[in-house]
Amino acid sequence: MVSLKRLTILYFKTALFMQRFAHSMSIKKVVVKSAGELAVNGVYTSQGPKVIPEGFARTCRKMGWTPSEMWRKLSDQKRPWFEAENESYMYWNRGDGKWWMDEPSGSGVYVCKSDDQLPPKFGWTSLMGVNERIPAVESINEDEKTI
């Protein structure tokens, strides 16, 4: 028999998950500011998790990989990813548990270890050879309000 304590814990964990999931579904855009790599600064729009970023596909083709296979391998196919007008993009990589911020060419420039459903606001680190000014990320909900 399941104890009341276990049921209560399960209830709160489920409620917290649902709250985080609902919150992530209301976010349609993120804004990247203050990054030393200027190409990644800007407004990013939420994309469906099964759609492959063009920069990602370009990198795969350049390396001789099949973009759809690599996307299925690296993306969890659940979290949205975000794309800027210049084709910079951010996605969560299930292989290393990090959010990646890539420039239009598909080269990674910043990463952040996080299991969040959305790109984290802070905690980004620069990859080797990239300007050290670290980006800040703001989420914008469907009412165009910064969260």
Image: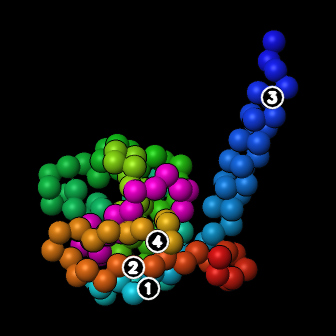
- The residue drawn where x is 22% and y is 56% is 60
Q: Which residue is mark 2?
A: 135
Between 12 and 87, the residue placed more toward the observer is 12
Name the front one of labels 1 and 3: 3
Magenta run includes residue 108: yes
Sequence-wise, which precedes: disc 1 or disc 3?
3
Q: What separation in Å lies between label 1 and label 4 (alpha carbons)?
A: 11 Å
Quarter occupied by residue 72: top left
Give the residue type at disc 1: Lys
Numbered range of the magenta stretch = 101-118
Rendered position, 93 above or below 143:
above
Mark 1 vs mark 4: give the one in front: 4
For marks 3 and 4, give the CA distance.
35 Å
Q: How many marks?
A: 4
Q: Position of residue 137 (x, y in %)?
A: 49, 76
Q: CA distance from mark 2 to mark 3?
A: 42 Å
Q: Which residue is mark 1?
A: 33
Residue count near mark 3 (Cα–Cα under 10 Å), binned few <14, some 14–19, many ≥20:
few
The disc label shown at residue 122, or none: 4
Q: Position of residue 84 (x, y in %)?
A: 43, 78
Say what amino acid the circle numbered 3 marks: Lys
- Mark linked to residue 5: 3
Q: Quadrant of residue 20?
A: bottom right
Q: Amino acid at mark 4?
A: Phe
The reply to whether dot 2 and dot 1 touch (C-beta < 8 Å) is yes
- Please tell me whether residue 113 belongs to the stretch shown in magenta: yes
Q: CA distance from mark 2 to mark 1?
A: 6 Å
Element at label 4 = loop
Q: Which circle's residue, 1 or 4, is located before the other in the chain? A: 1
- Amino acid type of the residue tagged 2 in the rendering: Pro
Tell me the residue at 38%/69% (across/down): 124
